[in-house]
Image (cartoon, grey):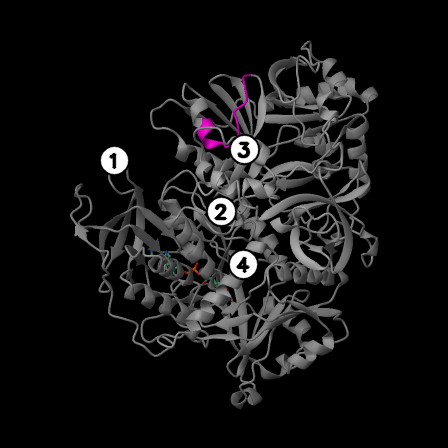
């Protein structure tokens, strides 16, 4: 491998500087595209010679930065400047293959693809400044039964979103493509009619031209060299820019980091960590195919997920890209200053083996030779989703980096950030892209062995792998674990990871392997069934590492919380499930709030929402100093002790009165147990009698061992996250992230009973009051299914599987699990509000099969919640 080879080619876009693909001159020289927003004012500190003032500074002139600036300008925010250190597109954009895949395994990805298709189609149809965007379609040959399951699921969810994906036969794929043929290994394929390809440079230049025409400014050959956070001035940020050997500063309210593979460096200038890794990624362009010189036939892109290649027409040649080899991270200690409009040396070995396999389907590949290798930098995050949204803990700094398919996702990045910057509320739930889903844990380690670099290499190797619901990543672990990690591992715990935290997912049966994944019931089912039955019939203990905990105290604490949540606050010594709304009345998050004293509260929130919800609370804190908000508490670990024998078990270790009258359901107390101080919450996410014991991590092993020293005859058993999930689904308990988020109103989710509309004020109050008389858009529900008509072995339908009424898709599954206490397969999900009262005719899609389903008014296990209240 070598860096720095400058590209000679490419038919698919070049860095700007001379002429763009439309033949227009690329604009005047540096600094002379000054827009309406610019006004130069002297720097009061005298540290830098000149200060400009803009509302928004976008750093990076690739597809993503250009799209953000254009979306902002189109929304009326033209007081922006885009700063690009070289020419527009000089990062990863100029050499991208330009494929615009529209479908994805996730709803957000699918919407982003759809939005790209709509946006780029409009730009292509603009007679005054058309971009080059061709619709080609794409098909995916499927070689394994698991892949066909996946295709069926994708067709089902796409249909729910109004996309027409279809399953096609090998013969149909052959008929669509002049060079692709089945070698007898293909079972069926997936046809995506929306896929296309675009000229990435043309797109970026066009977006920049449009922004400039609306008054925004673009400065090329201007490098951001530092960023300061300002206090006590009317601007929040000062961006230092070097241009022509001079440094000047721009003050602004909002910084958008769209610096591509320099995203981590730009973040660091602002004191912000960003878990980004850069990899080499490559495609090749073949020699000319003689019959394509004259022939303008458009044929579909082929994307083969098993051999891991994609192939499409590029003018009179073929463009062939691949994954399926070891991920090659580069610049593990930081990107070099100069890699503008550059490529890595070709990696013939990485591509040769895959190309060989691909020739079984496209023999022409072996005949036309290779004209060009394009091996460039691509940026990944540890979960392959981009970082788009606010950075944690600061105001006015937005990330738009780690955008792995950035030509495609540039459109959605522009839409989402513009909504955030202009209105505060996004149309889509963009939590999967929220930079705050990663805490400092994702920055663990350094260099090649850092968490991010290591994880990203593993993910790259499985790039086209089917997204099995129980896939786990095995590399770079553990990064966050409780004191019990080794103890549980010795007892056969099979760990998974949640927001970086190691949690036992199940105990005892076979270890996890990428090779045995399935959409049907997996090998751990029997082990999890035993754990659930032990919790139902005796008592189970679970180490629940990583609860989000905040402590809120002070004379203004109660008033503050009362305004932040839409529910009533609990009384002292009590606990209440609480919900937070956005100003528009949709659900922001949830928390279990315990009131330790009148002015002292414990906040327990979703593990993954630690940074995001803390930001939310901080943004709404009163500025009179009456509230102290603390991230974390003294008690850092949690043991859940659940089951009908839990009281008997705990009573053997404490003198505290644990009777229902002294320690009632939804109460909280400080108790000493086995010599350890614990905040004991009488709550249960599994629907059994039980306690959550919050203790110091240093006391965790002692407490756990004490439980085991007296618990054997009471039937004590360890249980893990899979059992927890199975039991909460049986109970019909919904959760933030899986069942609800910012696209749902409390009425959609069935949270009406938690709303306290009599409170004089809370965030979102006016909006929900206005909604109260309207029919809800969605109706949350619980279904049981009969999977016996599923082809092959049975399994639980995956999230997003459509729910149908008399064959019409009217909703979707959010969570599904086998309920081992009841023996039922249970799905949670939504149907359209007009079906809130529908009681029959339901089916749920199980990988292409319409499974009969019965809707229930409540969770199916102990529907009147008698068991936890004893
Ligand atoms: C071989 C290959 C093929 C690909 N094919 C596809 C594809 O088919 N479809 C697809 O959607 N994606 C594809 N990608 C990914 C795509 O190229 C990127 O996701 C996309 O270009 C990212 O755009 P961006 O604007 O985020 O970053 P970039 O294009 O890298 O832009 C960032 C810009 O920031 C500028 N910058 C950096 N630091 C500073 C600074 N200090 N001051 C000022 N400016 C700065 C850089 O000069 C650069 O121009 C491919 C990638 C590779 C490597």
Is the distance from the Cβ of mark 4 to the nearest ligand 1 atom less than 8 Å? no
**Earlier-in-chain disc, 3 versus 2:** 2
Is residue 296 magenta-colored? no
**Earlier-in-chain disc, 4 versus 2:** 4
Q: CA distance from mark 1 to mark 4?
A: 41 Å
Give the residue number, with chain letter if any, for mark 4.
Answer: 111
Range shown magenta: 561-572
Spot occupied by residue 496 in the image (x, y as percentages of width and height): 66, 41
Taking the view exactly as shown, the residue that stands out farthest to the top is 655
How busy is the neighbourhood of tag 4: few (under 14 within 10 Å), some, or many (20 plus)?
some
Give the residue number, with chain letter if any, for mark 3.
Answer: 755
Disc 4 secondary structure class: helix
Contact between marks 1 and 4 (CB within 8 A): the answer is: no
| Res. 232 mark | 1
Q: Nearer the viewer, residue 291 or 71?
A: 71
Q: CA distance from mark 3 to mark 1?
A: 39 Å
Spot occupied by residue 2 in the image (x, y as percentages of width and height): 48, 63
**Earlier-in-chain disc, 3 versus 1:** 1
**Earlier-in-chain disc, 2 versus 1:** 1
| Res. 434 mark | 2
């Amino acid at each position: 491998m070598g860096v720095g080879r400058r590209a000679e080619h490419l038919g698919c876009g070049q860095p700007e500087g001379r002429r763009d693909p439309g033949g227009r001159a690329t604009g005047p020289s540096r600094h002379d595209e000054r827009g309406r927003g610019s006004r130069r004012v002297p720097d009061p500190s005298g540290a830098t010679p000149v200060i400009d003032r803009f509302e928004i500074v976008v750093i990076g002139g690739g597809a993503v930065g250009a799209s953000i600036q254009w979306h902002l300008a189109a929304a009326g925010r033209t007081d922006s400047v885009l700063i690009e250190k070289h020419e527009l597109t000089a990062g990863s954009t100029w050499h991208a293959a330009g494929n615009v895949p529209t479908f994805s395994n996730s709803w957000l990805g699918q919407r982003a693809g759809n939005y790209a298709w709509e946006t780029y189609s409009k730009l292509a149809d603009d007679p005054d400044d058309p971009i080059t965007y061709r619709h080609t379609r794409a098909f995916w040959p499927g070689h394994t039964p698991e892949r066909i399951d996946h295709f069926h699921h994708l067709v089902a969810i796409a249909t729910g979103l109004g996309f027409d994906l279809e399953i096609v036969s090998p013969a149909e794929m052959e008929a669509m493509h002049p060079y692709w043929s089945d070698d007898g290994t293909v079972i069926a394929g997936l046809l995506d009619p929306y896929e296309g390809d675009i000229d990435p440079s043309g797109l970026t230049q066009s977006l920049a031209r449009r922004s400039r025409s609306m008054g925004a400014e673009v400065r090329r050959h201007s490098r951001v060299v530092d960023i300061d956070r300002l206090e006590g001035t009317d601007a929040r940020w000062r961006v230092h820019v070097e241009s022509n050997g001079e440094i000047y500063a721009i003050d602004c309210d909002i910084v958008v980091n769209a610096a591509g593979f320099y995203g981590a460096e730009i973040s660091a200038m602002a004191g912000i960590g960003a878990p980004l890794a850069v990899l080499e990624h490559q495609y090749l362009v073949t020699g000319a195919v003689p019959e394509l010189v004259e022939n303008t036939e458009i044929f579909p892109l082929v994307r083969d997920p098993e051999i891991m290649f994609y192939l499409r027409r590029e003018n009179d040649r073929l463009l062939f890209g691949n994954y399926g080899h070891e991920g090659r991270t580069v610049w593990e200690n930081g990107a070099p200053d100069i890699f503008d409009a550059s490529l890595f040396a070709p990696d013939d070995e990485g591509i040769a083996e895959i190309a060989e396999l691909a020739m079984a389907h496209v023999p022409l590949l072996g005949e036309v030779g290779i004209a060009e290798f394009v091996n460039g930098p691509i940026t990944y995050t540890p979960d392959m989703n981009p970082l788009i949204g606010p950075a944690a803990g600061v105001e006015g700094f937005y990330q738009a980096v780690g955008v792995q398919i950035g030509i495609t996702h540039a459109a959605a990045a522009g839409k989402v950030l513009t909504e955030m910057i202009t209105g505060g509320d996004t149309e889509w739930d963009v939590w999967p892209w929220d930079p705050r889903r990663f805490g400092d844990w994702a920055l663990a380690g350094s260099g090649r062995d850092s968490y991010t670099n290591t994880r990203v290499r593993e993910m790259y190797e499985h790039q086209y792998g089917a997204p099995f619901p129980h896939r786990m990543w095995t590399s770079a672990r553990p990064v966050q674990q409780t004191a019990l990690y080794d103890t549980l591992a010795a007892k056969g715990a099979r760990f998974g990871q949640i927001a970086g935290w190691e949690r036992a997912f199940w105990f005892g049966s076979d270890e996890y392997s990428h090779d045995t994944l399935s959409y049907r019931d997996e090998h751990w089912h029997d082990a999890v069934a035993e754990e659930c039955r032990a919790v139902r019939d005796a008592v189970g203990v679970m180490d629940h590492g990583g609860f989000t905990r905040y402590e809120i105290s002070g004379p203004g604490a109660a008033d503050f919380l009362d305004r932040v949540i839409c529910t009533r606050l609990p009384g002292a010594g009590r606990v209440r499930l609480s919900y937070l709304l956005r100003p528009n009345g949709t659900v922001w998050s949830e928390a279990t709030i315990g009131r330790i004293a009148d002015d002292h509260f414990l906040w327990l929130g979703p593990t993954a929402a630690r940074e995001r919800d803390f930001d939310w609370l901080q943004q709404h804190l009163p500025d009179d100093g009456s509230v102290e908000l603390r991230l974390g508490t003294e008690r850092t670990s949690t043991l859940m002790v659940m089951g009908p024998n839990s009281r008997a078990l705990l009573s053997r270790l404490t003198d505290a009165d644990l009777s229902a009258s002294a320690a009632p359901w939804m109460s909280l107390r400080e108790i000493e147990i086995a010599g350890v101080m614990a905040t004991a919450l009488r709550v249960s996410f599994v629907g059994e009698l039980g306690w959550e014991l919050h203790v110091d991590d240093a006391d965790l092993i002692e407490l756990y061992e004490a439980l085991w020293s007296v618990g054997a005859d009471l039937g004590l058993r360890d249980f893990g996250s899979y059992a927890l999930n199975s039991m909460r689904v049986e109970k019909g308990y919904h959760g933030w992230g899986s069942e609800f988020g910012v696209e749902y109103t409390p009425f959609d989710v069935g949270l009406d009973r938690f709303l306290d509309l009599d409170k004089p004020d809370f965030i979102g109050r006016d909006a929900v009051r206005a909604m109260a008389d309207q029919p809800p858009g969605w109706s949350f529900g619980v279904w049981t299914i009969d999977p016996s008509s599923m082809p092959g072995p049975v399994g639980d339908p995956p999230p997003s599987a459509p729910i149908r009424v008399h064959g019409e898709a009217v909703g979707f599954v959010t969570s599904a699990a086998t309920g081992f206490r009841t023996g039922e397969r249970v799905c949670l999900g939504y149907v359209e509000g007009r079906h809130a009262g529908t009681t029959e005719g339901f089916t749920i899609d199980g990988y292409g099969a319409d499974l009969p389903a019965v809707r229930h008014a409540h969770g199916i296990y102990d529907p009147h919640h008698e068991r936890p209240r004893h």
